[in-house]
Amino acid sequence: MSDVQTITHSKSGASFRIHRFGATVLSYKSPDGRENLFVSRDAKLDGSKAIRGGIPLVFPIFGPPKEGSGSTMPQHGFARNNVWTVKPGSAHDEDSHAGVALTLDLTDTKAGRGENNPWSESQAKTDGTGCRLTLDVKVDATSLTTNLVVENTGTDGFDFNMLQHTYLAVDGRAAEDKDQCHVHGLGGYSIIDKVDSSKSGATQSYDEDVTISGMVDKVHIHPEGHNTLKVKVGVGGGKAVRLEAYGEVADSPVPVSCVVWNPGKDAATKMGDFGDDQYQDMICVEPGLLGHEPVLPPGKEARLTQIIFSS
Ligand code: BG6
């Protein structure tokens, strides 16, 4: 089976492309032919590192391992660094939508688990850690839905973070143009600013959108009692897409937080898999179960569903 599969919704002409490495969605085209996702022209597609663009999946950790934990798991975990399996018979193209599903079992992973953590090869068996990940992707005339499910197949509970690290394409090189590129809908979310820690702890104002100027790396933690994430993202050319996300752990809804990231010019030039000038062409809007570490009991499932509405 080829590593990259294109699924087209014949009825509308919308389509997506997915790579088995990391179950990374690489492309989502609306019926008008617009590409909604950004992939770096220097992205590695040979499995040598996580794909720089599309929708990489972040699990079970967000960022580097906890300081002092001794864990050597790579940043953002192992989901994006392994070859997933296409679920036999899952590809379909119906009147209402088209889609496919991929899975990854912890026991089939080859990379990214590191040492000194419950997921590592040396500890997982004795610690009773096990999981199966499933990504269900569906496209229809107006939207792309990516539903990531984690099932605890082990005998012990585990805590985790999970995100969809969505790289949205920005037209007209407009990422730093505040009128054209902005994230609306994060008012009331509290901010962890990973670039300027003195700005952490602030609450995002309802009157202002989140915009890009130089490197931006902000985690927006959901307000109390606010589960669903709903944002509107200006993506250049006067266009906006809507992005929604929902979370569930062990049959109960959980709140979804949201990272906004752009490397800016200086960091872009230092990244081997990112075109020097391409910081102008993208904005990452990353819904995730963050800001708390839910515990998933054995036999239970956690899910994070993202829907990008392109029109
Ligand atoms: C974001 C993080 O989610 O991903 C940033 O908040 C990080 O800190 C960015 O730089 C890209 O990470 P990576 O591992 O794909 O280079």
Image (cartoon, rainbow, N blue to C red):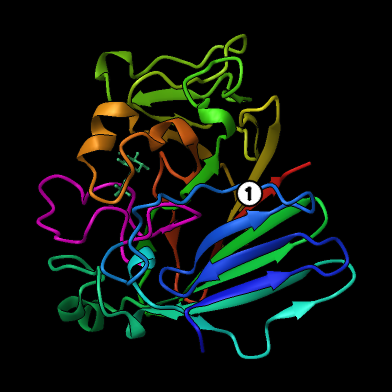
Tag 1: amino acid: Glu
Q: Quadrant of ligand 1?
A: top left
Q: Is residue 224 visible?
A: no
Q: Residues within 10 Å of mark 1 (few under 14, many from 20)?
A: some
Q: Is residue 138 above or below residue 34?
A: below
- Residue 225 point in image, percent of width and height: 61, 33
**Residue 52, x across and y down, in percent:** 38, 53
Q: Measured along the vertical axis of the image, is residue 199 above or below residue 158?
A: above
Of residue 165 and residue 276, the one placed in the foreground of this image is 276
Residue sitting at x 13%, y 68%? 115
Q: Is residue 53 magenta?
A: yes
Specify the principal SS of the magenta part. loop
Q: According to the image, label 1 marks what residue? A: 35
Q: Is residue 151 magenta?
A: no
User: Residue 123's spot in the image, x, y percent?
Assistant: 18, 77
- The vertical placement of 105 against 186, above or below, is below
Q: Is residue 108 left or right of residue 98?
A: left
